[in-house]
Structures are given as structure tokens and as C-alpha cells.
Amino acid sequence: MKKLNKNRVIYFTAVLLACAIFLLVGNRLAGEWSLGAFAGDYGDIYQRARVLRIIDRSVEESEWTGDILTDIIFSAEITHGPQRGSRLIGTQTLSTMTGTDEREVREGDRVLVGTIPGTDMHYLGNFLRSNTLLVLAGIFFLLVVLFGGIKGFNSLVALGLIGASIFMIFIPALFSGRNIYALTMIISVFAVLATLAIVVGPHKKTLTAIAGCLGGVAVSAGLMLLMTRLLHLTGDYSSDTMMLQNLPIAIDLQGIVFAGVILGAVGAIMDVAMSMSSSLWELREADPTASVKRLFSSGMNIGRDVLGTMLNTLVLAYVGSSLTVILLLVSYSGSVMEVLNMEMIVVEILRALVGSFGMLLTIPLTAGICAWLYSRNATTAAPAEPAIATDTDEDL
């Protein structure tokens, strides 16, 4: 048992070391880029502050638009950074024309105060929401570890590594002019390898799930490239993409669409492959004599059940993320056909369809690999007792 535990420690150390090397080397090769690199001399400076008191509040009606403007002048103390402890006077401006129900700033609020460079003009940039989010995230992480144990902790580690790859490699390399298609595939492969290698560990389930995932991602990528051409997508379909075009570098908008679709599909494809791989392993454990044909047939049955719920999950996730846009387009468009042929809607439909195709073809691929690999050592003997009571996995 000590030897097994030692081997697993060596394995996870090697995996984490390989991930760290990938991130460091990838970041070095990605090119020079930093947060706010394109802001120039015109980017406003934001500082965290605490509102001390409300100095004045005035309300007036605009002569030109007729909307009601409310100006609130407040004093605040900077709470972080080199100017910590210094005080400033800021302004919050509310307008009825925006149609939003923004709360007026109050004494004691934690806020972000914006400063226009080269001036003493300060304004309320936003309420400081990150602290509350950090508390919520901390509770979530704690619950994941409590309920998931070591595998829950490993899942958080894998999630952190994937996030690091996005911000350390993908974004800097994109802004440095690297090929976005190659970047997307590299990050997708890294996400699959890192997640499954860390969460599942040294096991046959890891190999089968990785193979199924990579096959599904490859299918989704090929289909997305084909659809980009057939549907004549430009990638220029929203105010966000227009702002990207204003950057002092060339951004491949079609590549941005490709990356968004593929990266969004990786998680769902991974979920399907892992669910099938794990289920078929449990079936093999219950019946070590199961043949390739039986395992494959069971895998297809499991895959059909998994696919039914995962399709709904994928489609509803995309609908939920773009609900505001959909409502606006439906409200101001003259016909259903007009809406369905808008590039913005087409891209959202593609997200669901391409991800679904990837999941669909991951099922037979994973089932076939599992059936072949799991049945290689099939015996007629009764299942052996696991080496460790708390870990029934078979290490490679």
C-alpha cells in the first residue's frame, strides 16, 4: 500500500510539473503582452476605495433629451495601492434614459473610483463586487472539497490550470499575432489531458476518456471550419467584435468564432467521454468476462442516455448566455427567417450544433476504445478485492 501511495504521489507530481513547464514555456513563447497594453495614455485609472460620506445630491432635467440626471458628489478614501489612505472627491451620475435601476452610492460602500488621466476628475466606476464573488467562490471551493474529497480538490487544481493556460498562453499569444486556430487546439488538448490526468489519475479510464475526447474535439473543429466557409461567416456581428477591430493589431474575427465554439464544447465532450468510460469500467468490474461486443453495446446504451441530457444542457447554456441578444433581435426583426439568418443567431446555433456533433461522435468512439481496452484482460474468475478499500481504480 505504501508503494502504491508513493507511486501515485510521483505520478501526480510529474503531471503537475509537466503542466507547470507547459505554462511557463508557453507563456514565454506567446509573446510580450500585459493587461491594458492597448490602453495607451487614454485609459482611465481605477482604484479601490471606501465611500466616507455623501457631500451633495442634485437632480435636474436635461433640456435636450428630457431625461432626469442625478449627480451625487461623495468623498472616498483609497484602500489599496501606493495612494492608500489618500482621499478624493468623486461624482456618480445617474440618468433615467439608461433604463437601469442603478443604486445610488452610500456611505460605507466599497467602490471602484475612476480617474481621468492628467486631471483631478474622479467618478464612480463601479461598485466593488469582486470581494463578494471571492467569498462565494471560497464557499464553493470548500464544498467541492468536502463533498468530492481528493477528487474534488484535484478538479479545482485542473480548473486552475485551464484558467492559467487561457490567461498565460492563449490571450497573450492571440494579441501577439499567433495563429488562433492552432492556439485553440493546443489549449483544448491541454485542457483534456490536464483535467483527466489529474482528476482520474493513472488508470485505463483516463486513456479511454482522453482518446474519446480528442476524437470528439477533432470532429468539432473540422466541422466548424467547414461551416465557417459554407455559411460565409465573418465574425463581425456585434459591438464587441467591432471594438476588437479598433485594436492596434489584426484580429481574426472568424478565428475568434472558431475558438469560442470549440473551447465551449470541450467541457461537454469531456463530460460525455468520462461518463461513458467510468460507467463501462464499473460494468467490467462487475463482470470481468464481458466481451467486446457486450461492452460496446452497453456503452452505446449509456451514451444515448447521457446524450439526451447533455444536449439539453449545451443548448440551454448557450440560450441562457445570449438571451438578451435573442430577445432584442426577435423584438425588432420583421420575420423569423430574418432572425434565423442573422450571423449573430447563426453563430449561437452553431455553438450548440457543433458541440452536439462532437458529443455524438464521442460516444461510439469512446465505447469502442473502452470495449477493446477493458476486455483485453477479461477472465472467467470472480472480481478480485481492491488493493485499497477506498480506491477501486486499476492503475496503469
Image (cartoon, grey):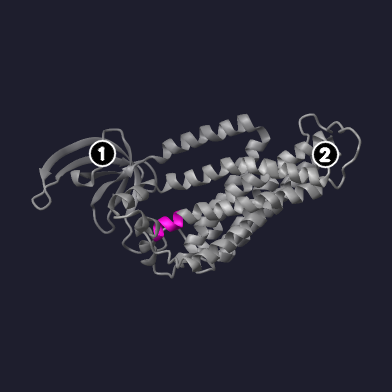
**Mark 2 and mark 1 residues within 8 Å of each other at the beta carbon:** no
Q: Nearer the viewer, residue 272 or 303?
A: 303
Measuring from the top left, give residue 243's x and y in whole percent. 36, 62
Q: Residue at x 47, y 54 (%)?
A: 349
Residue designated by label 1: 101
In this orientation, which residue lies closer to the viewer: 160 or 111?
160
Quadrant into which the N terminus falls: top right
Q: CA distance from mark 2 to mark 1?
A: 59 Å
Q: Is residue 217 magenta?
A: no
Please state if 212 lies on the left or on the right of 388 as rendered: left
Looking at the rendered structure, the kind of residue marked 1 is Asp
Q: Quadrant of residue 150?
A: top right
Question: Where's residue 65, x and y in %?
Answer: 12, 51
Neighbor class of circle 2 (other Cα within 10 Å; few <14, some 14-19, many 20+) is few
- Between residue 313 and residue 79, name the one nearer to us: 313
Labelled disc at residue 139: none
In terms of image quadrants, where is residue 233? bottom left
Query: Residue 268: x, y in percent?
Result: 58, 47
Rendered location of residue 215, percent (x, y):
67, 56
Residues in magenta, as a range? 343-348
The amino acid type found where label 2 is placed reads: Leu
Reading the image, the residue beneath label 2 is 4
* Labels 2, 1: front one: 1
